[in-house]
Amino acid sequence: MSCALELLPSEILDQIIFFLITEPPSLGRHNRRPDRHIAQSKNRDLKNLVQCSRRLLYVVRPRLFTHACVDLKDECGFKDFILASDLARHVQSLVVISEESLIHPLIQPWWHRTFSFIDPTRVTVHAPPLFIGNTLDIPIVDADDEAFDIHLQALQLEREGTPSVTNSLPLENCKNLLLARPWTSMSINESSFMKSYSNDEYFLLQAPSIFKWWSKQAIPESPSPQISTMIYGITSFSYTAVLPSYNHVKLMLDSLSAMPGLQFLSVQLASDTDDQVQQIRWPGGTNYNFHVSWGEFATAYSLIIYEVVHKQSLTEFQSRDCALEVIPADLTSGLDVDLKKENWALQGAGLWRRRK
């Protein structure tokens, strides 16, 4: 015998299911240290509901796979399931996880294969720096890898609109994910730079990063002829790292010159979930052993504010550090004073907007 819930029209069931939907965990965790568990969630309401009956399975499953996750070790199984269950048109965002560092040059890139059957408007990649570099057709310098101990980084790309018919979007000549779709939003999490400060010459070390080739000065020497067009259409950019050197932050800021239409910039240079950072604390606090790293933090913010003030396309700036417990309250007040002088108004929660 069917329960009363199953007897409801599909439209009403869909409304009920809507109130069980939560934000995908990958969004809330994107600014934390990257790991392969980014898509795991303790909330199993929808998963439990699909096990109740065939009717509920039919109604709920498209919602359940609106935000999908694939470990590239099981890429074929993921594709077979999505196609067999007729879910391809429902997938709006995809988390891609890989523990491999290199992409074989003679094998079709993973995004070619993925976009042949789904067309998400948001793609999040958690993988080693070399893998992300290969995904973007950018060479990554890894000579100083041991000094940084960065196992995974995160790249998130998003575009406007809805998934389109994948067959009309050929990718045969596309060598990097950035050119595969008209992305407008980009977020990068480069993980923690803390280990590098145990080296007295930390400022000479090169972090494994994609930013080396994106400044105007570097573009003429770039190994990729398409480097200048890769991020041209980005209007929203977010950067996360745990206490990077100010030299590296300058490299990141230089890349903004290749985004002439950038309107929103968000940064976070510390973490309240990282045990190392909590132990170090702000200068003057207990267990303060890495004063150099916080000096780099302060200098990096002075460079960021200069860029924010002088990049005329920017209309909004967010410092997510302002909400972190490990950061003193005077960071917010100091930023506010500097930005108010340049015609920026605090909107709350570390968010400023340029006055017209």
Image (cartoon, helix red, strand yellow):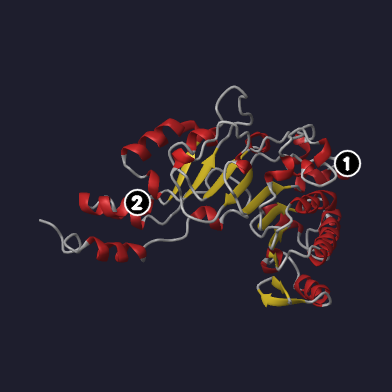
Say whether marks 1 and 2 touch (CB < 8 Å). no
Tag 2 secondary structure: helix
Residue 93 placement (x, y as % from top left) = 48, 50
Screen quadrant of the N terminus = bottom left
Quadrant hosting residue 213: top right
60 left or right of 240 in image:
left
Residue 180 placement (x, y as % from top left) = 58, 41
The circle on residue 204 is: 1
* Mark 1 vs mark 2: in front: 2
Quadrant hosting residue 185: bottom right
> Which residue, as the protein is rendered here, is positioned at the far front?
168
Image vertical order of residue 339 relative to residue 18, above or below: below
Q: How crowded is mark 2: few (under 14 residues within 10 Å), some or many (20 or more)?
A: some
Screen quadrant of the C terminus = bottom right
Point 67% across, 68% down: residue:
323
Point 85% across, 57% down: residue:
291
How far is the residue under mark 1 from the one under mark 2? 50 Å
Residue under pointer 2: 62
Residue 215 placement (x, y as % from top left) = 80, 47
Amino acid type, mark 2: Pro
Amino acid type, mark 1: Leu
Residue 216 placement (x, y as % from top left) = 82, 47
Observer able to see residue 209: no
